[in-house]
Image: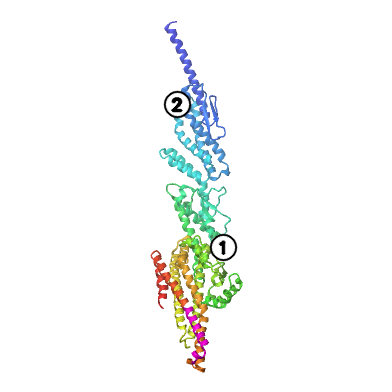
Amino acid sequence: MGLVENYELYEILGLHIFGRKMQHELILIDDLLFALVGIEGRYISIKRVHGKADVVSFQVDASMDLALQEFAKRIFPLCESYLLIDEFVESRSQFKHGLVNHAFAAALRAFLLDYQAMVAQLEHQFRLRRLSIQGLWFYCQPMTGSMQALSTVIRKVSANNYAGSAVLNLLQSQAKAMAGDSAVRSLLEKMTHSASNAYLSILERWIYEGVIDDPYDEFFIAENKSLQKESLTQDYDAKYWRQRYSLKKDIPSFLANIAGTILTTGKYLNVMRECGYNVQVPVSENSKLMTFGSNHQYLECVKAAYEFASGELLSLIKEKYDLIGKLRSIKHYLLLDQGDFLVHFMDIAREELLKKHDEISVEKLQSLLDLALRTTAAAADPCHEDLTCCVERSSVLKGLSRLKDLDIKNVSHGNDLEEPISITGLETFSLSYKIQWPLSIVISRKALTKYQLIFRFLFHCKHVERQLCGAWQMHQGVRALNSHGTAISRSSLLCRSMLRFINSLLHYLTFEVLEPNWHVMHGRLQTAKSIDEVIQHHDFFLDKCLKECLLLLPELIKKVEKLKSLCLQYAAATQWLISLSIDIPKLDEQSDGSVGSGKLKSKNPSQVQKVMTRNSAVTDSILKFEREFNAELQSLRPILSSSSQAEPYLTHLAQWILGAGNDQ
């Protein structure tokens, strides 16, 4: 065969091979167009991993030309991403997966429509024989990055079963990670905005109405419906205000910095709703929260809603419910600012208060308290009917050791706070106050307990003062008698020293602690911008008063209690001491009138011995009280000196109390 014939044969074979390759390429393009929308073809198949619904792979027939196989494998990731996204859209379009997932699926469906339109245009070009395998890769390449970014998000959402805030945070973090690809980042931000619309609608109802409309538990604020507002008057921990509404762990990152403000805004509105006021934040088109972005308009909306809610609630509590007036009334009674009713009450209830705490009739005490309130200046106070009495089970010292939230110094010595063997109503009597909603937010059970601790300490100090005043009056009553050779004068000095101690202590508590701190708190409440500031200032006032009244310093309060106990023991023994001292000179006078004092010694040695023994016993008793009292008083000095550098108020206490001890 000649050269010409060979050339013609090769040409025919080449055209045949070229035609066959062209035919395979056309078939592959057709299969790829189907694969781009998740459909198998003649040479392309879909493989799924058993047990892993989100793992799919496309495979091309091995008989296909190797070069064409390589082109196909470049496009397969796009096909796999489409199939994954499409299946996610179908599964997450159900509302049981939450509103955010539903909104995200809707945004993905709209994106897939654009994607399918692109595939349709490519198919049209293919039907016109204007699309090659290289052209298909060229037109698909820009979409590949976006589809793969979305499939990455979808895999994480499906694997972790994300919903609500977690989906939004994932979209935002992925958008930030794609900072180098502006198109992909723009797409992810658009998806975030679309998915957040449903979330922001929940947020709008919360900050504009104080209502949580969260049927699928996606919102970052949790509501504990088991806690009712009535619990504030019973629960020492005041859980309602802190735990009725609380922040969850999953907070959208774009709201993280203002989550506390959002929580507070809704809480304020909810309080007003609980009071029967249908208060709603004024909403305009500019205050809609249906989108967020770099302009941070949503931050301004939240801030405006907070300021409105805060102002309205503060005005309601201060003006309609007269918070300041209620606090002032509590100050009159529980901080003994208005003490005339207490004097009358202690007089008429003395017999009942002297009983053991488990034998006291609270009903009888309440009737006596009502009588004291009606017959004194307290009757003019419209709040006096809210005052009630109660009898605690333990002493103040024991009650303090149970306060876990207070900063009690030297807590390790809590076991040293021994309970008296037999405590009476004088140690356990307390006043309480009926606080209604919404004032119970500020004056909670916890705050009222602190008021009661201060009251019980003051009340017992007042009792000690009254007993010493009675002893002093007894001394004054025998001043005209001849007290020569008796210990009455020594006893009078001791009584005056004890009185100066208890008066100095009461003066310190009243004029150095309670009054100044009250005025500071009152001024702060006038300028408070929110109810949380009011609560903070009120709690700070109570904690500061407890501390400066020594109730959080066990070592010091034990010393003060010991001194008060000595004063009461001395006051109880005063009548016996004075009666014995008076009887001694009477014996002398009787002897002088009959046989003469000189003869008494020789004629009645037993009477002389009796007089001397009784005089010695009285003197020894008074000296014993004096030694113990002075020793306890002076033992305060090193304690106050060592603590006054850290606690300046102790310097004032030392000046008052130790000054009283030195002035004898």
x and y percent of residue 656 in the render? 41, 73
x and y percent of residue 637 in the render? 41, 70
Amino acid type at image mark 2: Gln
Q: Which residues are magenta?
A: 599-622
- Image quarter of residue 548: bottom left
Placement of 410 over or under 356, stated as above or below? above
Q: Give the position of the C terminus as an image quadrant.
A: bottom left
| The one of 200 and 521 positioned closer to us in this rendering | 521
Q: Give the position of the N terminus as an image quadrant.
A: top left
Question: Mark 2 or 1, which is nearer the eye?
Answer: 1
Q: Which residue is mark 1?
A: 234
Amino acid type at image mark 1: Gln
Placement of 393 over or under 61, stated as above or below? below
User: For the residue carrying disc 2, how many other residues have a C-alpha within 10 Å: few (<14), some (14-19), or many (20+)?
Assistant: few
Say what secondary structure mark 2 lies in. helix
Q: Which residue is mark 2?
A: 134
Instruction: Please give left or right for residue 136 compared with residue 232 in the image.
Output: left
